[in-house]
Amino acid sequence: MTAGESDWVPPGVDTRRANIARVYDYLLGGSHNFLADQDVGRALAAVEPAVRAIARANRAFLGRAVRFVSDAGIRQFLDIGSGIPTGDNVHEVAQRADRGSRVVYADIDPVAIAHSRTILAGRQNAAIIKADLREPEKILHHADTRRLIDFGRPAGLLLVSVLHYIADADNPRGIMATLRDALAPGSYLVLCHGTAEGQPTVVKAVGKVFNRNVATQSHARSRAEIMRLFGDFELVDPGLVHLPLWRPDSPADVPSDPSTFWCLAGVARKP
Ligand SMILES: C[S@@+](CC[C@H](N)C(=O)[O-])C[C@H]1O[C@@H](n2cnc3c(N)ncnc32)[C@H](O)[C@@H]1O
């Protein structure tokens, strides 16, 4: 730990290098980020002034989708790429619908893991596991996943703004097939993914800043490519849409050009 650094930083974390989880935390106004993350956040805002609004819209979509899936009767959730806990975490939203709802969070980032462990301490119905989405079997077979998720019953699988950090070389379609296959009929998949469709110039500029400064590269994908990640799951209304268009709480939340929120979001049900 260097002078002035907080005691919640896990050993071995290089806070001089920006990373996704902490840049996102910064964009959301959180406090688990450092100068390097803030610098990247500011550089992103310089090329895309709406980047903070997009981060907030992503987080808000996550909350609406978990409410929707809970209302459909789902009581167990697997949230991969869950991030550093902030407001309205999945277990809080799901357990508002039913105190017995169970949640497994999975993330690759040590700060996200450490902070999640702190806020989940003493809870029987939620856990965080350190896991890499590129190894989906390990996530599915982890002892905490097996303890909290009954794969014989419908579950909610959340992949919100994480798949665009998986390169084509790492086979995102294969990863998704493995995860989808593990779910029982009646399960839901919640997905949000960056796309350059509609905003090619700004998304290219954001990608450049991001990929130059953060070790993990980002990969925006086309609507057709994102659609394929749902496999044969059936999208619920309104389908795969730009973030603010997915069942907004208020019409006032929808900007005149929703494609300026350049992430496509959808919720689909396993037949
Ligand atoms: C933009 S944040 C999204 C957080 C949360 N899902 C949300 O939408 O509010 C992306 C998260 O994905 C995690 N992540 C990136 N690559 C990952 C991987 N290969 N396996 C697991 N998590 C990953 C990052 O550490 C980060 O916490």
Image (cartoon, rainbow, N blue to C red):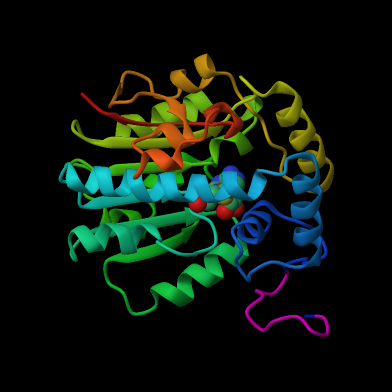
Measuring 74% from the left and 30% from the top, which residue is drawn there? 202
Residue at the image point whose x is 69% and y is 81% from the top: 6
Report the front residue among 52 and 159.
52
Question: Looking at the magenta stretch, what is its main secondary structure?
Answer: loop
The answer to which quarter of the image holds residue 38 is bottom right
Please indicate whether residue 76 sits to the left or right of residue 47 in the image: left
Tell me the residue at 32%/18% (across/down).
Answer: 232
Judged left or right of residue 174, residue 66 is left
Percent position (x, y) of residue 62?
41, 47
Write down the quadrant of residue 145 in the picture. bottom left
Q: Is the residue 111 above or below the residue 3 in the image?
A: above
Q: Where is residue 253 drawn, in percent x and y?
A: 44, 42
Residue 194 belongs to the span the image colors magenta: no
Q: Residue at x 75, y 68 (%)?
A: 34
Q: Which residues are magenta?
A: 2-12
In which quadrant of the rendered image does the N terminus lie? Answer: bottom right
Q: Position of residue 98 (x, y in %)?
A: 17, 61
